[in-house]
């Protein structure tokens, strides 16, 4: 199941899709996932080390670090599986966002030290960036780096509960307050971690930095290179979360459609009711639109310079609305059992709620999209 | 409605407002207004606080200990309590089975059951839904066979709210097979301490324990615990469902949620400003307020129709639909307003012991209620069933 070297991205994507599907169907059943949810670490350590062994955490890494050096699109099948199988492991936080920042901004020495461990999963990182509860717009960063240490606080950092290292955004006082990136040991002195679970069972933490020793990510570059790397990593995160939502939506629609065919009331399948058929059709259309927009956003990541925001935030805003509608309809059409925690429908519902807020909610991305629309009138 | 009826209802409204300010146990109000989980003792204290003024059974006839409230007074009672953020009035005894017993029960049944129901000395559960009988309630299969002076009951009920606390369950059972499935259903009162009763908790999507499966395995129920004639249970079930759909609480709850949404939008920050200054979000709130206004107007219209005898069977369905849907949108918008606090969830804090991981101290409760409230368009007749009723009875459309 290990990722083959030398394959092109399309071939690789097809192979990955197959092997991830095979692995999760066998080893990440709903029952196994229960055990992972009950684990105090809130994920399956076995699954995480398997992902490392198969090379799924190293898709984007250079070959000398044990990676596959594949394009950003190859993470899509993985993220779709995260949504479809409701995986709990820190794939998005560590293998996509954290790794993306290190690839962009770590020095050669730092890379040599970090990348091999990220590749096999023995190192997990999280990106500590968000500072307020606001999901409606981008907020200014007020954490500071001074005297070799970080001061400030971060909220709801995905998988900061289990990360070994944290990549922290903070303003560098001595260069006019530019936002830069630092790497911090998660058990460093002066760092307080308040761990908790998100609605979907994944771990997160609030962090407070009281003069925590930090090392700059110090690849050479322009003064705002870190800021640009953050923007690029967040774009990747947004597209990855679209893929994750797509995976969840596809699984949920399949479950609802199946239920319409099998659940009988008044002597016939409930799916014989035209009112329900039309609602199911609407959910199916939304899924197709989300899929098309997500593909467009993936292409925009690697190919588009102009108009990236329009496609990426547009895809994100559309996906948030579609996910909300589909999740609500899935619960409603399943009836009582849809509200129970014993069926996966409610787990998808909660996962999609989390995805609707992480990295900015619908309003946030709709606003960004709207700003790219041509002005009306003269 | 007559002037006198209005005046009586307004006097009641003032009394209830006064009660919410000073008579209401403040520890309970603190929890309920934050949508936290109340325990049984707290609910019992709440119901008894209401009954200390006769209100828990205010809608019962005077001869059975009630206050003969008009529909309007009943509306005002539920509306005012919900508006103040009080807990829901536990309906299973006082609202559901009590009226069935005083309307259809025997004299000994009335003497035996009505006083402890009014006083909340007994906790009741509702044994209606089954795995194969949800929207299609008449498809229920729990069977009761008469052997001498006892029924032997076998079957399974589900989504039974608070069965874990209940002493008794009123239950629809099949006592005969008939081509018309509504025939052959009977209404039994089952002592849940009887041998053969097993209660299994079912966690809902808010990760809390409200509902249960109730398994009945050769449970013996004395024939004197049947209410109404054998086979006449469907009539009683429909009578009870009509009582289930009263609508004061829906209106009051909506106003309470709207008020909280507004304070939250004024408190939460958004990119250096307040969330309320985000024009898109502000508009969402205003749109919701208009829908709440329409719900309230429709409710008063239904009350007027009821008093003048012009009530249609579609009205209760319309109000149930509108109240549950507008509430779901209100609380979903409130979760949105919480931003990142709307995705952090620690069920351990929902009983009031500690603050949620993020956000204001009601953030966890708002999230919990948002999740649990997805069921509001499913229980008590799903939105699909309500729309079928309206299509048929108001519009004459046949499937």
Image: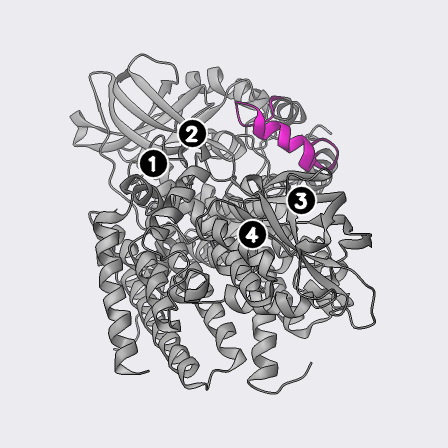
Chain of the residue that carries numbered disc 1 in the rendered image: B
Q: Quadrant of the C terminus of chain B?
A: bottom right
Magenta part of the chain: A24-45
Q: Are marks 1 and 2 in contact (CB under 8 Å)?
A: yes
Chain of the residue that carries numbered disc 2 in the rendered image: A
* Colour scheme shown: one colour
Residue A203 seen in the current view: yes
Q: Are marks 2 and 4 in contact (CB under 8 Å)?
A: no
Q: Are marks 3 and 4 in contact (CB under 8 Å)?
A: no
**Dot 3: what SS?**
strand
Total numbered badges shown on the rendered structure: 4
Question: Counting residues from the N terminus, which is met first, the one under dot 3 or under dot 4?
Answer: 4
Comparing A127 with A261, the one in front is A261
Comparing A224 with A192, the one in front is A192
The answer to whether residue A306 is above or below residue A23 is below
Pointer 1 local density, CA inside 10 Å: few below 14, some 14–19, many at least 20? many
Q: CA distance from mark 3 to mark 1?
A: 37 Å
Residue carrying label 2: A196
On whether disc 2 and disc 4 are found on a single subunit, the reply is no
Q: Which disc, if any, is residue B214?
A: 3
Q: CA distance from mark 2 to mark 4?
A: 50 Å
Q: Name the front one of labels 3 and 1.
A: 3
Residue under the image location 56 percent in, 65 percent down? B240
- Residue furthest out toward the top: A189
Q: Is residue A38 magenta?
A: yes
Residue A325 seen in the current view: no
Q: CA distance from mark 3 to mark 2?
A: 34 Å
Pointer 2 local density, CA inside 10 Å: few below 14, some 14–19, many at least 20? many
Residue carrying label 4: B112
């Amino acid at each position: 199941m290990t990722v083959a070297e030398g394959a092109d991205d399309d071939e690789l994507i097809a192979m990955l899709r197959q092997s991830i599907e095979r692995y999760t169907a066998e080893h990440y059943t709903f029952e196994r996932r229960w055990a992972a949810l009950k684990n105090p670490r809130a994920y399956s350590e076995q699954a995480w080390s398997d992902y490392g062994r198969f090379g799924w955490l190293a898709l984007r890494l250079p070959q000398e670090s044990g990676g596959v050096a594949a394009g950003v699109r190859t993470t899509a099948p993985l993220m779709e599986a995260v949504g479809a199988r409701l995986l709990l492991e820190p794939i998005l936080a560590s293998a996509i966002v954290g790794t993306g920042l290190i690839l962009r901004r770590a020095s050669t020495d730092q890379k040599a030290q970090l990348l091999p461990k990220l590749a096999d999963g023995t190192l997990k990182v999280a990106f500590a960036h968000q500072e307020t509860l606001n999901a409606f717009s981008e907020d200014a960063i007020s954490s500071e780096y001074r005297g070799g240490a970080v001061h400030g606080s971060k909220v709801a950092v995905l998988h900061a509960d289990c990360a070994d290292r944290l990549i922290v955004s903070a303003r560098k006082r001595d260069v006019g307050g530019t936002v830069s990136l630092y790497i911090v040991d998660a058990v460093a002195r002066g760092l307080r971690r308040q761990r908790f679970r998100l609605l979907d069972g994944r771990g997160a933490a609030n962090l407070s930095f009281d003069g925590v020793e930090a090392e700059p990510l110090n690849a050479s570059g322009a003064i705002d290179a870190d800021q640009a790397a953050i923007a690029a990593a967040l774009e990747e995160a947004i597209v990855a979360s679209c893929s994750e939502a797509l995976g969840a939506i596809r699984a949920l629609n399949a479950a609802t459609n199946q239920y319409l065919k099998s659940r009988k009331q008044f002597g016939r399948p409930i799916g014989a009711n035209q009112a329900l058929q039309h609602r199911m059709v609407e959910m199916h259309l939304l899924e197709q639109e989300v899929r098309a927009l997500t593909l467009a956003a993936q292409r925009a990541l690697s190919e588009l310079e102009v108009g990236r925001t329009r496609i990426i935030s547009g895809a994100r805003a559309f996906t948030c609305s579609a996910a909300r509608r589909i999740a609500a309809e899935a619960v409603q059409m399943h009836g009582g059992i849809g509200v129970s925690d014993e069926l996966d429908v409610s787990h998808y519902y909660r996962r999609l709620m989390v995805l609707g807020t992480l990295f900015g909610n619908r309003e946030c991305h709709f606003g960004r999209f709207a700003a790219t629309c041509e002005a009306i009138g003269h | 409605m007559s002037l006198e009826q209005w005046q009586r209802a307004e006097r009641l409204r003032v009394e209830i407002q006064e009660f919410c300010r000073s008579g209401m146990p403040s520890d309970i109000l603190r929890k309920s207004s934050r949508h936290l989980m109340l325990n049984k003792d707290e609910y019992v204290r709440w119901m008894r606080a209401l009954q200390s003024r006769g209100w828990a059974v205010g809608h019962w006839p005077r001869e059975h200990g009630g206050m003969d409230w008009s529909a309007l007074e009943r509306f005002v009672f539920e509306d005012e309590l919900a508006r103040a953020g009080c807990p829901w009035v536990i309906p299973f005894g006082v609202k559901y089975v009590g009226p069935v017993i005083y309307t259809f029960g025997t004299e000994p049944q009335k003497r035996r059951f009505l006083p402890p129901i009014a006083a909340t000395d007994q906790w009741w559960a509702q044994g209606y839904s089954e795995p194969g009988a949800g929207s299609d309630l008449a498809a229920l299969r729990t069977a009761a066979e008469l052997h001498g002076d006892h029924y032997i009951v076998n079957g399974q009920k589900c989504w039974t709210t608070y069965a874990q606390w209940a002493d008794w369950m009123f239950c629809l059972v099949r006592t005969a097979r008939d081509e018309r499935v509504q025939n052959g259903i009977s209404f039994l009162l089952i002592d849940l301490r009887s041998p053969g009763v097993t209660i299994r908790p079912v966690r809902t999507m808010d990760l809390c324990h409200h509902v249960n499966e109730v398994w009945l395995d050769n449970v013996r129920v004395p024939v004197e615990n049947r209410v109404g004639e054998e086979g006449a249970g469907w009539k009683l079930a429909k009578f009870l469902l009509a009582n289930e759909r009263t609508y004061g609480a829906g209106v009051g709850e909506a106003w309470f949620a709207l008020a909280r949404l507004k304070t939250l939008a004024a408190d939460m920050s958004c990119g250096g400003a307040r969330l309320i200054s985000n024009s898109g979000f502000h508009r969402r709130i205003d749109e919701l307020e208009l829908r709440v206004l329409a719900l309230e107007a429709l409710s008063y219209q239904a009350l007027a129709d009821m008093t003048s005898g012009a009530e249609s069977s579609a009205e209760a369905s319309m109000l149930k639909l509108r109240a549950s849907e507008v509430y779901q949108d209100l609380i979903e918008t409130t979760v949105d307003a919480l931003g990142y606090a709307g995705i952090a969830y620690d069920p351990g804090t929902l009983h009031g012991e500690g603050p949620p991981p993020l956000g204001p101290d009601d953030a966890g409760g708002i999230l919990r209620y948002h999740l649990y409230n997805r069921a509001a368009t499913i229980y008590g007749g799903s939105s699909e069933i309500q729309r079928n009723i309206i299509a048929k009875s108001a519009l004459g459309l046949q499937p």
